[in-house]
Image: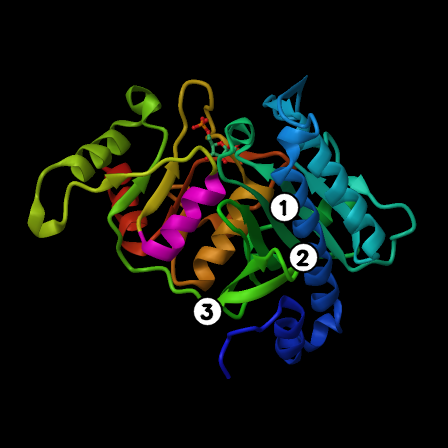
Amino acid sequence: MSAAGVTLNRHILAEERRYPDMAGELSDFLSQLGYVAKILSREIGRAALVGRLGLIGERNPTGDPQKKLDVYANEICVDAFARSGLVAAIVSEELEEIKQIPGAGEARYALCIDPVDGSSNTDINGAIGTIFGLYRRKNGDIAGDVLRRGSEQVLAGYVMYSTSTMLVYTAGHGAHAFTLDRDLGEFLLSHENIRCPEQGHYYSANLGHYQEWNPGIRACVDYLTEQDPPTRRPYSLRYSGALVADFHRCLLEGGFYFYPPDNDHKNGKLRLLYEASPLAMVAREAGGRASTGREDILGVQAGSIHQRLPLVIGSPHEVGLYEKFLAG
Ligand code: F6P
């Protein structure tokens, strides 16, 4: 069947048979996510007109300055998923502690979410995103329900707000993308079963920290920027300041993104539960890879909800290259 005109809801219904143990919850979750993405897409689009740009003057639990949109988007996400009855607990970049949802003690899932990824881009009309990972609860203590390995996610993905709004998800059977038709108010399937190229020509990193990186990583960058046409070097640099946007390029066109430890971020900058693990699951489902440089992201056991770690993600060839340089 042609993918043309397939709505998110229709796609989920067709996929449902693959997930008998989710008993309709996959549809409920993705429908709610689609709803959240539409609200955020609208509100991000008009933030400049309703006084919702700029800082609020506070820092989030991991010390980053909070933007008005961070706080607003967090409220939308928490409220929408709390009302869904699907999740008992939410970990959010914007919340100090795990949010336990009142009256949802029986709910079977726990959600990890970054409501606005790349918030330094909000005030310059740049691309931003929402990243999410969903876990089935173990029915132990609530901390045990969220302190998990990425390999245990049942569903993960992101929404990217850019020239169009796109929702990318995987539930373990490929990664699929839906583009919001703003006139219809529907997400329509635009990229079915995405395949990340084995090798690409782009690299994406904040090179301002080059001097602070491990010598192996500096050697890798030197290799990427050497002139050697037979191996298609130099690579082209693309860095938007939003992980979602930079990863999305790697996913569709190949290449890699990395954020290594530096002087200000001794353990790396990105957060395991609501940044690295969800994107790692999407990468894996599309044939890409994600690693700390030494270990598969999906195998990393979370020790705390806002845990940071180094991340390299994208095409298998470049992720492998980075690991080799890092190993020396
Ligand atoms: O905190 C996450 C994030 O905003 C990513 O989306 C992005 O890739 C990175 O941080 C940007 O960090 P920096 O401004 O240090 O390059």
Question: Which residue occupies 75% across, 72% down?
Answer: 24
Q: Report the mark closest to the observer, 1 or 2.
A: 1
Locate residue 27, reporting x and y percent: 71, 68
In percent of width and height, residue 237 lies at: 28, 37
Q: Position of residue 154 (x, y in %)?
A: 62, 61
Mark 3 vs mark 1, CA separation in Å: 24 Å
Q: Quadrant of residue 206?
A: top left
Q: Is residue 175 above or below residue 101?
A: below
Residue to which mark 3 is pinned: 193
Q: In 3D space, how far apart are the residues under numbered discs 3 and 2 (Cα atoms)?
A: 19 Å
| Residue 249 in magenta stretch | yes
Answer few, some or many: residues within 10 Å of disc 1's Cα (few below 14, many 20 plus, some between 14 and 19): many
Q: Is residue 252 magenta?
A: yes
Q: Looking at the picture, which amino acid does disc 3 mark?
A: Asn
Q: Which residue is situated farthest in the top direction here?
A: 57
The quadrant holding residue 156 is: bottom right
Provide the residue span drawn in magenta: 243-254
Q: Quick one: label 1 or label 2, which is nearer the N terminus?
A: 2
Mark 1 residue type: Ser
Residue sitting nearer the eye, 168 or 309: 168
Depth check: give the residue in front, 236 or 89: 236
The percent position of residue 42, horizontal first and vertical second, equals: 66, 44
Q: Nearer the viewer, residue 191 or 268?
A: 191
From the viewer's perspective, is the residue at label 3 or at label 2 nearer? 2
| CA distance separating discs 1 and 2 | 10 Å
Mark 1 highlights which residue?
41
Residue 289 as seen in the image, left or right of residue 167: left
Tell me the SS state at disc 3.
loop
Q: Which mark is residue 34?
A: 2
Mark sitting earlier along the chain (3/2): 2
